[in-house]
Each structure stands twice: as structure tokens, then as C-alpha cells.
Image: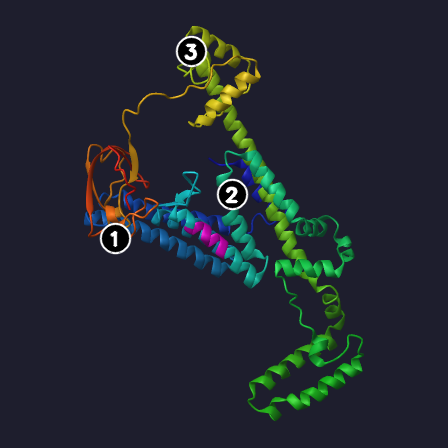
Amino acid sequence: MVSWWRLAFIFGPAIARGDISSFSLYTPFIFGHLLGRVVKNLKNKVKLRGWPFKIPDDQLLGWRKRVGLEMLGVVAFLAACHFLKAETRSLFNFFLSSFVCPMLRHWLPNRNKGPLWNGLPLWETTWGNTSVHVLMIVGLCLSWAFQGIDHLFLGFLFLQAVPELQRRFWMKPTQHLYLVVGILIVCFPFFSIGLMAWYFPTYLEMLPKPYLQILCTVANAKPAVPDHYLTLGLSPDADMKTIKKIFREQAIELHPDKVGDDPIKLAQFHKIQTASDALTKGRAEYDKSIENQELNEMVPRCYAFLVMMGYWLLHSLIDWNDVEGMRDQHKDALRSHVMRGGDVDLRSIGLTMDDGGKELLKQYCEPEDIELPFLSGKKEDIIEMRSLLQQSGYQLAKLPQVTGKIAALQQEVVLGARDSKCIREMSSTANFYNGYELVVEYNKDAEEEDGETKEGDAKGGNMTQVVTTVVSYEGGDKRLATIQPPLGVNPV
């Protein structure tokens, strides 16, 4: 679904600047769209049953043609950018965000669990997500080291890291907004210079030089203007006659006719020649450029940082508005369900399982401005609903406790081994393996003290075989199967 607010915030400033017709404005979005089409076609290969071992030749050839045409479109677009001399500095970041990261998640779907803490893993994700996060961290570090806080670093930050944060905080817009405001406070020195450059440029000259030098060090922004006075061995207050005299003396000593092919002396000759030209032909401009080199370096970087942070802040506000709207829709749907007399587990929220309990719940839900939980299918929904009822003065029964004996246990496993060939042979159709028998062999003697099996000791020793049945199969990229009876081990 198109977000017109987002499009307005992206293209609105371009309209204000009058460069809405500039081709460079659209190149990143077109490039990202073309790469997205390539990714979509590459992912479609796993939908062909048995890939890459049992695909009919005509289907495989058709898939190759589609992928080839999409890639040809990307190459043609890059050639057009080169021919039109369009701005392409940000395309590398779009290549990472639109192609590399989705394909890493697709190629590395295996689960990655962190160490246990109080019986639960510290994190539970996939190796694809882990690879993307490592790529972002390494990219931020390398771009800072080689270029400082400039367009490449900001690209990694706002095209890689920020979307990941937005994905994690999608259903937590308030926390997301707090995070953005917190980052703005931490980065206030850079943020403030960007604001001053935009609204109060005359105040920039009042910033103390030591303060700017510290910011340059943090941003790894080394002044790029060479010190021509130091090259010639002169003081900044030397007059024009002295400059020409010193240059003439050094040029005689370092002239190519005298030094021959000595590369060091030739390079030094070109340096003093460049310094002399700068000081004799445009000394006023040069002196002005070196008056505050730190400020000249920091202003464009801080201005870009200000713009990107402004976009992030605005997008977080849009996310907050979208989520709140979605919450209102869900609450209206829940209210309508209750008022229609739909089925509700009244016992779990502390009400009696009879008409009296239904009437109490209807009484609570009847006002349109009453608070209702956003249903996510988790226990927190019940806790929130009980809390809302208690705050409104309703007397609730205690939360039901499960008592008695466990009749049966089930276990969830991911079908497929670390062998990529085995994974590619797995069907992605839901419920495809329902009723299948699953035979697992493991070396009982190779188990470590913490209960995990040592990798590499699966053969030999006291081999134990466990047979179980697949009750349900989720399919898709997860290949998650529910089995019964449980294996009693964590299969490797």
C-alpha cells in the first residue's frame, strides 16, 4: 500500500527546490525497484518442487530467462545513469538494502539461537538476519574509517540500520519515537550545526575552533585543504614578493631538468608549483578557505545528518499514526465481535462463563472511547484485558491455573539438515509431510554435560534411534514441523 505521507516527505523538498524533474532524484528508487524484481524472481526458484534436482527443463529454462531479463534491465539502467551522468553515489547502499540483505535472509534461513538465560535463549533469529546485522555493523565501521560521517556512512545508517530498527519497533511506536529523540539528544552537536547552517548561518563563525576540532575527530572528517604556506616554508603573513622569491629558489633546485627522473623530487616540484599558483593567483580565496577548515568540513556532513534524522523522525511519527490507526481498527473489530455476542474465553479474563459474564463484558465494551487490547494472540492480551477491567472496577476471578497431569507432549523441529542440498529438497507446501514418520539417530555417548550433542561425534559410539510422527508442517522458508511423541533430544 502506497503511503502518500512518505512520498510527500520524500518529494516535497525536491518540489520546493525546483529539481523535481531531475533524473538523479529518481535513480535510487528505480534502482531499488529493479533489484526487488530480481530478488523476487530468484526467490521464485524454491517454489519449483524439488529444486534443483527434479525441475523439468522447460521450467528451469523459463526461470533462467526471467532472471536474465531482470538482470539485463538493471544493467541497462546503470548504463543509462552513466550516459546521463546522473548522481549514483547512493546506489551502492540501495544495492545492499534491496538485493544483498534480502538474498542473505533467503539463502541462510537456518535458526540461530543465543545462549540460554533462565531457560530461554537470549536471542532467536536466523543466520540470514545475523549476517545482515553483521554486514551493517562492519559497513558502518569501515565507512566511518575510510570516509567519516559522510554519504556512505549515512547510507548504511539510514538505508540499513534504521529500517531494521523500524521493523523491530513497528508495533511499539512510542518506544520508537523515544529512540529517535534519544539519538537526536546524543547527536545534538551535529544536529545543532545542521540547524544553524540551515536557519542561522551567520552564527556558525561564533563556534569555537577547539569545539569544531573535537567534532571533526568524532566524525573522522579531516580537513581536505592542504597547507600551502607549510609546503613552501612560509608564514601566513608573508608578502607576495617573498612568496615568489622562495618558490623561485625551490623550483631551481627541484626542476625536472635538474633532478631527472627522481619521482620524490618531481612530486615535491609539483607540490610547490601548486602551492605557488594558489598563493599568487587566488590568495584571498585560499586564505578564506583555511580560516575555518573544520567548519567547512562539518557543515555539509551535519546538514545531511540533519535532513536524514528529520526524515527518520517524520517517518516514526507516520508509523505511530499508522499503528494507532490499525489499533483502532482492531479495537473496533473486537468491540463489534463482543457486542454481537461472539465467542470469548470469559474465564481467562476473570468473568463467569454464562450470560452474566457476557453482559458485563458488553457493558464494558459499549462506550466507543473505552480502551481495548490490541489482539496479538499472546498471553499479554489477556493480561492487558484483565488490567483494563480491574481499573474500571470489575471484580475478576483469579487467572486460571493449569492443574493435573500432562496427557501428551509435542515438539517443534526444523526439517532439513545443515546440508544445503537436503534443505533444497524439502517441500515448502504447508501440511505436505503430515503423517510422515521421522527417524532420528544420535550418539548418546557424545552428549555434553549441558545436554547438547557434540558436532562431529554423530557417527560411531552408542547410536540411539528415535521414531516419531509429523503432526503438522508449517512449510515455507521455516520448514517447521510439530512431532509427537517428542524426540527427547535437540536434533543437530
**Label 1 with label 2: CB-CB less than 8 Å:** no
Foreground residue, 9 or 379? 379
Q: Which residue is mark 2?
A: 165
Look at the picture and state if 317 lies above or below 204: above
Q: Is residue 431 left or right of residue 251?
A: left
**Label 2 with label 3: CB-CB less than 8 Å:** no
The earlier-in-sequence mark between 3 and 1 is 3
Foreground residue, 458 or 175? 458
Q: Where in the figure is residue 279, as x and y percent of width and height?
A: 73, 76
Foreground residue, 214 or 477? 214
Going 26% across and 45% down the picture, which residue do you hit?
A: 416
The earlier-in-sequence mark between 1 and 2 is 2
Going 29% across and 49% down the picture, which residue do you hit?
A: 418
Q: Which residue is mark 1?
A: 457
Q: Where in the figure is residue 462, as x and y percent of width and height?
A: 20, 48
Q: Say which amino acid is labelled 2.
A: Leu
Q: CA distance from mark 1 to mark 2?
A: 40 Å
Q: Say which amino acid is labelled 3.
A: Gly
Q: Is residue 50 left or right of residue 384?
A: left
Q: CA distance from mark 3 to mark 1?
A: 59 Å
Q: Which residue is mark 3?
A: 341
